[in-house]
Image (cartoon, rainbow, N blue to C red):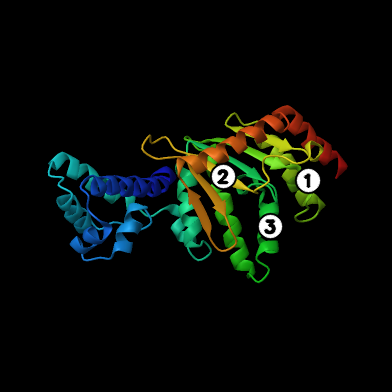
């Protein structure tokens, strides 16, 4: 199984969940009644409709019957989607160091056709060198064993394969200049990281901009975030906001729209790609 197939399972789960929700609502059936029909709770239906749990074929069949879906082709299509949605992602093998709330993000990241983000604390995980990632993980997880640190770094490097895969997404990152000045690791680690950023910024699918100190206050005042867009027309854009012990996934159009406008302003106010590379080269000369 390819990485894209396993990553796509998260998207299929969300797609199936949204279709089940639409079918239920079109029939005027409550979540409580739907839960009763499959011997489950209202909260279980809610989790299914949000795409946060795996699906049992029997549950899907019973719900489709309840919702009046009798066409065999339509039933077969949705049951097939359920089977695909249950495929375990490659990242499940990192379950010992990967919290559940981040597993969802890794799956969405791997399925996105466009990823846009703003970072202020450090270089985005998809652009970190091994040495820099090691320093970030060690700083963030001071109690972690050496083995755990290595596992976390390995996971980050595995995610990075996405940017050079056959179906690599368009990746647009706005890095606050603060992230470039904040040292992680020694001087050699930071030099290697700056060199890597210069090199990866030349990739045709990567757009890297620096938001310079000289601009002053800017649109990214709320902090780091990521906007994900998918090739599936039924799936809305999603904004990912990472917190210390959990994460938020926003998909309401009005909320996503606000973050999209912030990204547009950051892109307009930030340095151009070439000037951003000039900043990186200047920092490299200073180290």
Q: Give residue 139's quadrant in the image.
A: bottom right
Say which quadrant the C terminus sits in: top right
Instruction: Determine the secondary structure under disc 2.
Output: strand
Q: Which residue appears at 26% of the width and 48% of the height? A: 25
Instruction: Determine the secondary structure under disc 1.
Output: helix
Disc number placed over residue 27 in the picture, else none: none
- Asked if marks 2 and 3 touch (Cβ < 8 Å), the reply is no
Q: Is residue 1 visible?
A: no
For this view, does 285 lie left or right of residue 233?
A: right
The residue carrying mark 3 is 136
Q: Is residue 31 visible?
A: yes
- Asked if marks 2 and 1 touch (Cβ < 8 Å), the reply is no
Say which of 61 and 146 sits in front: 61
Instruction: Give the label, 1 or 3, closer to the camera.
Output: 3
Q: CA distance from mark 2 to mark 3?
A: 19 Å
> x, y percentage for residue 158?
54, 50
Q: CA distance from mark 1 to mark 3?
A: 15 Å
- Asked if marks 1 and 3 touch (Cβ < 8 Å), the reply is no
> x, y percentage for residue 206?
60, 33
The residue carrying mark 2 is 226
Q: Which residue appears at 78% of the width and 53% of the height? A: 183
Disc number placed over residue 191 in the picture, else none: 1
User: Is residue 106 positioned above or below 227 on the image?
Assistant: below
For this view, does 227 lie left or right of residue 118?
A: left
Instruction: Give the label, 2 or 1, closer to the camera.
Output: 2
Task: Bin the neighbour count of mark 2 within 10 Å (Cα to Cα): few under 14, some 14-19, many 20 and up.
Answer: many
> x, y percentage for residue 63?
20, 54
Q: Give residue 138's quadrant in the image.
A: bottom right
């Amino acid at each position: 199984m390819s990485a894209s197939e396993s990553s796509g399972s998260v998207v299929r789960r969300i797609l199936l969940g949204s279709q089940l929700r639409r079918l239920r609502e079109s029939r005027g059936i409550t979540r409580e009644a739907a839960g009763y029909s499959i011997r489950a709770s209202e909260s279980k239906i809610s989790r299914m409709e949000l795409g946060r749990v795996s699906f049992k074929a029997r549950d899907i069949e019973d719900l489709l019957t309840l919702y009046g879906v009798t066409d065999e082709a339509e039933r077969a299509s949705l049951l097939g989607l359920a089977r695909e949605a249950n495929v375990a992602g490659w990242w499940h093998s990192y379950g010992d160091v990967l919290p559940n709330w981040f597993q969802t993000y890794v799956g969405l990241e791997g399925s996105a056709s466009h990823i846009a983000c703003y970072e202020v604390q450090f270089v985005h995980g998809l652009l970190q060198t091994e040495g820099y990632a090691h320093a970030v993980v060690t700083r963030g997880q001071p109690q972690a064993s050496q083995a755990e640190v290595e596992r976390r770094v390995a996971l980050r490097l595995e995610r990075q394969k996405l940017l050079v895969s056959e179906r690599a997404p368009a990746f647009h990152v706005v890095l606050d200049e603060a992230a470039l000045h904040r040292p992680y690791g020694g001087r050699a680690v930071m030099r290697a990281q700056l060199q890597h950023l210069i090199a990866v910024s030349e990739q045709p699918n990567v757009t890297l901009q620096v938001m310079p100190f000289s601009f002053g206050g800017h649109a990214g005042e709320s902090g780091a975030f990521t906007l994900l867009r998918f090739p599936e027309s039924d799936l809305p854009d999603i904004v990912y906001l990472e917190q210390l012990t959990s994460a938020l996934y926003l998909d309401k159009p009005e909320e996503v729209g606000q973050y999209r406008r912030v990204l547009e302003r950051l892109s307009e106010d930030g340095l151009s790609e070439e000037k951003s590379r000039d900043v990186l080269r200047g920092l490299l000369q200073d180290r």
